[in-house]
Image (cartoon, rainbow, N blue to C red):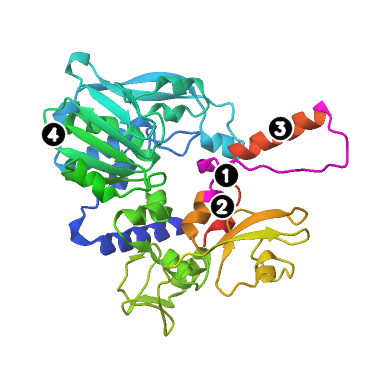
Amino acid sequence: MQLQRIRRRQFKAIHSTLGSVYTWVDVSDILKKHRSEEIYYHTDHHWTTLGAYYGYQALSKSMKLDTSKTSDMKPYAVTNAFNGTLASTSGYETGYEEPIYIYAPDNLKNATEAVVNNVNEKKKTATLYDTSKLKGKDKYALFLGGNYPILDIKTTADSTGRLLIIKDSYANSLIPFLIPYYREIVVVDPRYYYDDIEKVMKKDNITSVLFLYNGNTFVKDNSISGCYRMIRLNKYLSEAGVCSRREADRLIESGVVTVDGKSAVPGMKVEDGQEVCVGKKRIKSKTKKTVLAVYKPLGLFAQKNKREKKNIIRFLNYPLRVTYAGRLDKDSEGLLIMTNDGDLINGMMRARFSHEKEYKVTVNKEITPEFIEKNESRSTYQRQGEEPGCGDQAV
C-alpha cells in the first residue's frame, strides 16, 4: 500500500509537470474492474494479451478510436507452455506453464495487413508475431520479436494517420490492436534507441505520439527523459554532484528539495532554467561528463561504503564525484571505468545490454568436469535472476 501511495504521488507529479499539452490515460480503473480475470501472467511481470486488450479499450476512448474495427477479434492460444521471468527470477513456480494468446479477426479477409521493418537489423516481415520465439525461453518475445531500438510498421489501414509509439515491453502485446487505425506506426524503445527522435517525427510525418508504458518503468526509466528534454530530479541532483540518485530520492522524500520555490515530489522532472535547491543552497547543473580509466589493484573494494577505508573512491580521491561502471571484487585487479555519467553506468551494468566480460582466473584446485558443471548451473541461475548490481549502480 505504501508503494502504491508513492506511485500515485509520482504519477500526479509527472502529470502536473507535463501539463495540458499531453493527454494522460490511466488504465488502472478498467484493470481493477477485471481484476478477477487473467489480466497478468502468473509467472511473468507483463500483462496478458487480455490485460493489453482492456488497456487498448481505455486508450481507444481517449484517442477516439472506432472500436468496431476490432470487434470481431478473438483470442487464440499459440502456446500453453509459457514460464516467464518472475518464475526464473524468484525460483518459484518454475514448473508452472500457462498460455499466451494472440487476437485475430474471425474472418482473416477483414484483417489489416502490416509489414514490420526492423530498421537496425534491416529485416522485414509480414507479421507482428515471431513464432520462432515460442521455441526459446523468452516466449513473450513472440510479440514484435522482442524489444528493438526502432520498428517501422506500414499497414493497409484506411487512414492517413502516422503514429509514433515511445514504449517499453508492455506495449508489445497492445500494439497489434492499434494496427487498423494508422497507415504507419513507428515504434521506438528509448532504452536502446539513441538517435534524435525529433528527426524521426519529421522524416515519417508523424501525426500523433503515444507514450505506452508500464507505470513502474515510466517512473524509473531515465532513458525516457531524452524524449522530451526533461530530466528526473534525482538524476539532476546526481549529475550536479550532490549525491547518488538513491540518496537524492531520500532528500526529496524528506522535503528539503524545492523546485522554483515549491516542494519537490518523487518522480518529478526538471529542465534547464528551473531553480533547484537543497535546503537554501541552489544547485547548478553540471553538463560536463567525466570518464576515467582506472587500474584497480588487489585489496581494494569497488564499492561506495564510506566506512570501508580500502575502497576505490578513497583510493582515487578524484576532485569530482565519480563512481564505478562495473565492479571488481577485493581479490581481483584490472580496469575500472569511473564516471559521473549515470546513463553510461546504467548502459554498462544493466544485464539487458548483454555486455561480455572476460576474466583471467587463477584457482587453487584442479578443474574437474564436476566443478565446471556445478559452476555453470550456478551462473545460469544468476543470469535468470535480477540484474547484478542494480541496487548500487544508480548515480
Q: Kindly identify the amino acid type of the residue bearing the numbered disc 4.
A: Asp
Q: Is residue 29 visible?
A: yes
Alpha carbon distance from label 4 to label 3 = 53 Å
Which residue is at a point 58% across and 63% down the rendered structure image? 323
Residue 75, position as x, y percentages in the image = 31, 22
Element type where label 4 sits in the image? loop
Left or right of 160, for residue 198: right
Q: Which mark is residue 66?
A: 4
Which residue is at a point 75% across and 29% down the rendered structure image? 373
> What stretch of residues is rendered in magenta?
348-369
Where 74 falls versus 164 (above or below)? above
Which residue is at a point 62% across and 36% down the rendered structure image? 91
Mark 1 or 3: the one toward you: 3
Q: Are marks 1 and 3 in contact (CB under 8 Å)?
A: no
Quarter of the view holding residue 318: bottom right
Q: Rate crowding at label 1 as few (under 14), some (14 to 19) or many (20 or more) other CA atoms within 10 Å.
A: some
Q: Which mark is residue 386?
A: 1
Magenta stretch, main secondary structure, is loop
Q: Kindly identify the amino acid type of the residue bearing the numbered disc 2.
A: Cys
Q: Kindly identify the amino acid type of the residue bearing the numbered disc 1.
A: Glu
Residue nearer the viewer, 9 or 21: 21
Left or right of 64, for residue 237: right
Element type where label 3 sits in the image? helix
Please name the residue that numbered disc 3 is placed on. Answer: 376
Q: Are marks 1 and 2 in contact (CB under 8 Å)?
A: yes
* Nearest to N terminus: mark 4 or mark 3: 4
